[in-house]
Image (tube, rainbow, N blue to C red):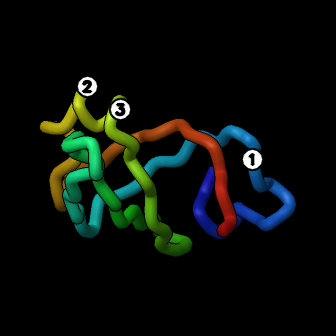
Amino acid sequence: MSIVELTPEMDNRKAILGGLITNVREVTTRKGAKMAFVGLADMTGELELVVFPNTYSQNADLWKQDAVVTISGKINTK
């Protein structure tokens, strides 16, 4: 699925996307866990991913700028 194909009607559904990581902003939660906000772009558009602490701690080394990734997650249009 491409970024341009995502619509508000798809809110709370699962999707698989691929693209290039354009930026990574790592933050620390109040509980001290690390998570990240990640920019993802494909040939059709760009969006921001939220990588929650559990997922981020399992593979923090994969979330690097200019890396090409395939991700799966739940769409949140808010």
Q: How far apart are the two marked residues, 1 and 3, measured between alpha carbons?
A: 18 Å
Residue to which mark 2 is pinned: 58
Q: Quadrant of residue 38?
A: bottom left
Q: Which amino acid does label 1 sit on?
A: Asn
The amino acid marked with disc number 3 is Thr
Badge 1 density bin: few <14, some 14–19, many ≥20, Cα 10 Å: few
Residue 57 higher or lower than 78, as above or below: above
Q: Badges 2 and 1: C-beta atoms under 8 Å apart?
A: no
| 58 with respect to 15 (left or right) | left
> Residue 47, how many percent across, how many down?
49, 69
Point out the residue furthest to the front here.
Answer: 30
Residue that carries the numbered disc 3 in the rendered image? 55
Q: Residue furthest top?
A: 58
Secondary element at tag 1 = loop
| Farthest-out residue, bottom | 45
- Pinpoint residue 3: horizontal percent, then vertical percent: 59, 63
Q: What is the quadrant of the C terminus in the image?
A: bottom right
Of mark 1 and mark 3, the one earlier in the sequence is: 1
Residue at 77%, 65% in the rendered image = 7
The amino acid type found where label 2 is placed reads Gln
Residue at 86% across, 60% down: 9
Secondary structure state at the residue bearing disc 3 = helix
* Residue named by callout 1: 12
Q: Is residue 36 above or below residue 42?
A: above
Question: Which mark sits nearer the N-terminus, 2 or 1?
Answer: 1
Query: Is the residue 63 above or below the residue 27 in the image?
Result: above
Q: Are marks 3 and 2 in contact (CB under 8 Å)?
A: yes
Q: Which residue is drawn at 28% across and 51% down?
A: 30
Q: Measured from the top left, where is residue 6 in percent x and y?
A: 70, 62
Give the alpha-carbon distance from disc 3 to disc 2, as whole Å.
Answer: 5 Å
